[in-house]
Image (tube, rainbow, N blue to C red):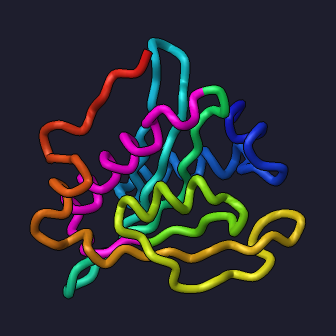
């Protein structure tokens, strides 16, 4: 909650987090937390929508503590989400990102995401969201290209 509240003016409430965790217990969500010892550096969430032709995954949230940004935490969490999404049958994934968040756009492009649309006024203060998709998630070699593997996605920080 501490990272969320300083990152967003209109942040997720405790109730939203509790609902997301309840969905984790039901198997429809997955979350990863990056830590250094007991200190939480960031967290990221994933929602996979199954399909008979290959599911889609949606990154629900990815947040890194401001003091830890640009140190590979978000990339490590993204790799972990990619492995999980593939294991759950997803062949493509999507997310929304603030139109003004240029460093985040660069991160997502490195993972194969490309702009696909805009959600006008999606964020607080009327800021638009850029909708990005990556349709390479199910491709052979994708995990290798992003530096992930099913057995080696954990990285130590701190």
Residue 28, quarter of the rendered image: bottom left
Residue at the spot x=21%, y=69% of the render?
A: 89
Residue 24 magenta-drawn?
no
**Residue found farthest to the right:** 125
Residue nearest the observer in this picture, 16 or 74: 74
Q: Is residue 63 above or below residue 60?
A: above
Q: From which residue to which does the magenta span run?
A: 68-93
Q: Position of residue 21 (x, y in %)?
A: 51, 46
Give the residue displayed 69% in from the left and 48% down from the top. Answer: 15
Residue sitting nearer the eye, 16 or 136:
136
Identified at 56% across, 55% down, the residue is: 104
Residue 14 in the image, given as x and y percentages of width and height:
70, 42
Can residue 108 be seen? yes
Q: Is residue 61 left or right of residue 90?
A: right
Quarter of the image that includes the N terminus: top right
Q: Main secondary structure of the magenta part?
A: helix
Q: Which percent across, then down, holds residue 11?
A: 76, 50
Q: Is residue 95 above or below residue 77?
A: below
Q: Is residue 86 part of the magenta span, yes or no?
A: yes
């Amino acid at each position: 909650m501490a990272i969320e509240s300083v990152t967003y003016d209109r942040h997720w409430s405790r109730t939203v987090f509790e609902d997301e965790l309840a969905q984790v217990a039901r198997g429809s969500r997955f979350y990863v937390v990056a830590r250094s010892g007991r200190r939480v550096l960031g967290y990221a969430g994933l929602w996979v929508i199954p399909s008979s032709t290959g599911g889609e995954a949606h990154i629900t949230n990815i947040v890194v503590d401001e003091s830890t940004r640009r140190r590979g935490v978000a990339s490590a969490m993204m790799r972990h989400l990619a492995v999980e999404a593939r294991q759950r049958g997803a062949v493509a994934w999507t997310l929304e990102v603030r139109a003004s968040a240029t460093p985040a756009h660069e991160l997502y492009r490195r993972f194969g995401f490309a702009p696909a649309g805009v959600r006008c006024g999606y964020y607080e203060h009327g800021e638009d969201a850029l909708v990005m998709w990556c349709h390479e998630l199910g491709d052979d070699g994708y995990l290798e290209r992003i530096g992930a593997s099913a057995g080696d996605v954990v990285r130590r920080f701190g």
